[in-house]
Image: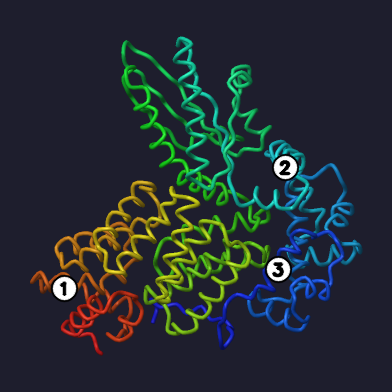
Amino acid sequence: MAALHSHHRVVPAQRGPAPSDVKKAVDYMRQGMAGKITTTNLAEVSGVAPRTLCKHFRAFVGVSPLAYLRRLRLTAVREELLKGADSYSITELAARYGFNHFGRFSVQYRRCFGEAPSATLRRARTDAGKQAGQERAKHLRNASNNLGSTRLSRETPSLLILPCETSGADAVHRCFAQHVAEGLAAALCRASSITVLVHSSSRAAACQDPRRPARELGAQYFLSGRLALSGHRVRITMRLLHATTKAHVWGDSYDGDLSDLFGLQDRVTKGVVGAIPANIRGAEIERAQRKRPEDLTAYDITMRAFPFALTSNPAAATRALELLENAMEIDPDYALAAALAAWCHAQLIMHNGTRVPAVERAQALLLAERADILGANDPLVLTARCAVYTMAREFEVADALLARALALDPTSAWAWERSGWLKTYLGEPETATEHFRRAIWRDPSGPSNANRYVGIGSAHFDAGQYDQGALWMRRALLERPATAWVNRTLAISYARLGERTAALDSIDAFRRYWPDATVGQVVAAIPFRPDFLDRVAAGLSELGLPL
């Protein structure tokens, strides 16, 4: 069956809550990575016997505690080498992260990354972006000496907001322009998981190249604006650019009247806050796709996997899993890679892409728990875990995770999309449709739009509005033909509308997607309410799908 994919894993026979001893051990390793750490130390910190800790690590992380620590250390060294580290030798760097036997370190590094540490450093130092990488590394070392800062820089893009240019404006309007920048910074800090920095107006005015302050502060992106006046009208043009290349990432303009400057500021803030996170995420994905394979970090590989993970078809989910497994091999401490992998396993169930749903379900839940251990407060991790628990029909858990994700980052298009699906499964079609539309507005060209269209169509189907349901599901297929699983409800919508020929064509397309599908398998894969599932079962049976 060509359309189905089975991503086999060895999984535990039983699943329990993520053990607190593993969380305590992971936190201890992160905080004292360079020190001498033994299994006995970790067991004492975790409050369990060494044998129990090893058992839990193998169950929830996949390796022993010391193997996990070694991979953490190797990844930390590689991240420093990829920055072109020149303030210390490789031997000093290895010792800084707890490798006291350089020969053994070199062998382990080569086995893990496929090259010698000297090759990594040599390549990094000859890269065109060497200067930016060194300045960023210097900033991070000055900002903090703990490993948490390095971790933040890897997972959280940073944005510098510059004051708007105001040539020809009077003091009042220059003050307003500065107020706009400060308001944007405050709003983005509250509403997104991006690290936001603000540059003072005096220093910015003295700097002819806006890339310079961005690089000095370690920001990958900067937001600049220009205020223009014409009579009683004022226009603010905003631009988001990459700090190293000055490549244009996003831009828009906002018009208003001088008598309503606060109203104009509100429109600018709403527009920028709605657009910036999705566009930075897209730029990070493009940057990762351009990097040479040998230069990829776990973060880069995860960014490459991100659009596949959100495309919502089994082939894309399987491709994402291949990338994410590589990312987890490079950095077993990376929560987002584990969370997205969990969601990909869940998709293989929900989109009828596996012959072994029980295996995929167990692996999805196991990886979701692992992500919780590694990154409990990352909004993307929380959103992915919400999606997994939705698949498992644990709606209360999913709802709690989603509430935390949106509290941390209310600009997240993916979180609003998952909220739309959760509301659809709970039988709240009007709220679901509103949340899907919010997701589309925040990320109008994202890889997940087809899935949002299916969601709106499913909400209409749930409400008995089969004409609108068919319209949106058909739109999803036109947007992304690989979402052929939508025919399982599109065919029924056509049948309810009396369009028999279209219904038969649609069910034939579903059979081509899943040749040996049965009604029972379809119903078991989707976590809708009983009334919704009864209509699906009856409709598919009437169209000839075997029970």
CA distance separating discs 1 and 3: 55 Å
Q: Position of residue 108 (x, y in %)?
A: 81, 67
Give the x, y percent position of residue 55: 70, 82
Q: Which residue is mark 1?
A: 503
Q: Are marks 1 and 2 in contact (CB under 8 Å)?
A: no
Tell which of 1 and 205 is nearer to you: 205
Residue at x 25%, y 71% (from the top left corner): 487
Please give the residue where the numbered disc 2 appears in the rendered image: 140
At 65% from the left and 50% from the top, the residue drawn is 152
Task: Check the picture and name the quadrant holding the N terminus.
Answer: bottom left
Q: Which mark is residue 24?
A: 3
Q: Nearer the viewer, mark 1 or mark 3?
A: 3
Determine the CA span between mark 1 and mark 2: 59 Å
Type of the residue with mark 2: Leu
Task: Characterize the local packing of mark 1: few (<14), some (14-19) or many (20 or more) Cα atoms within 10 angstroms.
Answer: many
* Vertical position of residue 460 compared to residue 131: above or below: below
User: Looking at the image, is mark 3 or mark 2 nearer the viewer?
Assistant: 3
Q: Callout 3: few (<14), some (14-19), or many (20+) C-alpha neighbours within 10 Å?
A: some
Left or right? Give the position of 106 relative to 331.
right
The amino acid sitting under disc 1 is Ala
255 sits to left or right of 98: left
Dot 1 or dot 3, earlier in sequence: 3
Mark 2 or mark 3, which is nearer the start of the sequence? 3
Three-letter amino acid code at the position of disc 3: Lys
